[in-house]
Amino acid sequence: EVQLVESGGGLVKPGGSLRLSCVASGFKFSSYTMNWVRQGPGKGLEWVSSISTSSSYIYYADSMKGRFTISRDNARKSLFLQINSLRAEDTAVYFCARSSWNDAVFDIWGQGTMVTVS
Amino acid sequence: SYVLTQPPSVSVAPGQTASIPCGGDDIGSKTVHWYQQKPGQAPVPVVSGESDRPSGIPERFSGSNSGHTATLTISRVEAGDEADYYCQVWHIRGDQGVFGGGTKLTVL
């Protein structure tokens, strides 16, 4: 079964840090661009960051440059998101999602991991 | 930055056709994807590109895109279609993904 499973969320104080993880199974992880998308409570989807297959190309939303770092480990079929200097407005469910390339649809999503900054 | 604009809500009676617009500057030149999200669940793609439907998505879901507006059309709407719908593009100039604000579809 093709699957993405996120972990690492939790309650953290403002100014703290978190490292989110997303583990893939059921497909060749190294062949896909991977993405993070977040959704604040009662709000819409917000694209956070994307990373190419070999980590050569990395992109961030303007509002997240500097505090967010995306990375991947193809050998461990894992995607990561490091978030530093957390703020209340970072409170959200963070989803990882797969796509074939930047312009392609996000075809597989994880169930999300909740980050609460308070 | 690139902005996609969706109406907050659309209402339609069962069996009728729902049209959900997504406005953006010259969006007709971009590849638009549509996602359905039900409460407490992850988004699910329903239409990608010109009008490709992922496996398992009914033919009732279709997309169009021209000029400054892309549209998701749901024919013969059913109660189970009630959900939030989001459009999404990759903005090449800014190297960024962009989602619309989302539209809540209510089936009357």
Image (spheres, coloured by chain):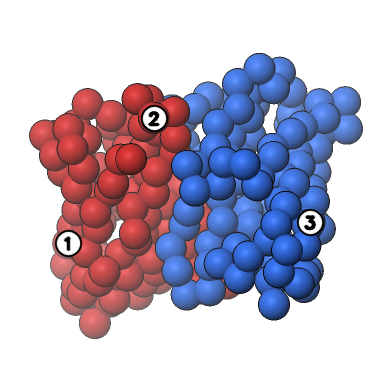
Marks 2 and 3, how far apart at CA? 27 Å
Residue placed most toward the observer, A64 or B83: A64
- Tags 3 and 1 both on a single chain: no
Residue at the image position 77 percent from the left and 62 percent from the top: A16
Q: Is residue B87 visible?
A: yes
Q: Which residue is mark 1?
A: B17
Q: Nearer the viewer, mark 2 or mark 1?
A: 2
Q: Which residue is mark 2?
A: B94
- Tags 2 and 3 both on a single chain: no
Q: Which mark is residue A21?
A: none
Residue at the image position 69 percent from the left and 40 percent from the top: A69
Q: Residue furthest right?
A: A76
Q: Is residue A3 visible?
A: no
Residue B93: image quadrant is: top left
10 Å crowding of disc 2: few (<14), some (14-19), many (20+): few
Tell me: residue B64, above or below residue A102: below
- Tags 2 and 1 both on a single chain: yes
Q: Secondary structure at mark 1?
A: loop
10 Å crowding of disc 3: few (<14), some (14-19), many (20+): some
Q: Quadrant of the C terminus of chain A?
A: bottom right
Q: Which mark is residue A18?
A: 3
Q: Give percent across and percent down for residue A76.
A: 88, 32
Marks 3 and 1, how far apart at CA? 44 Å
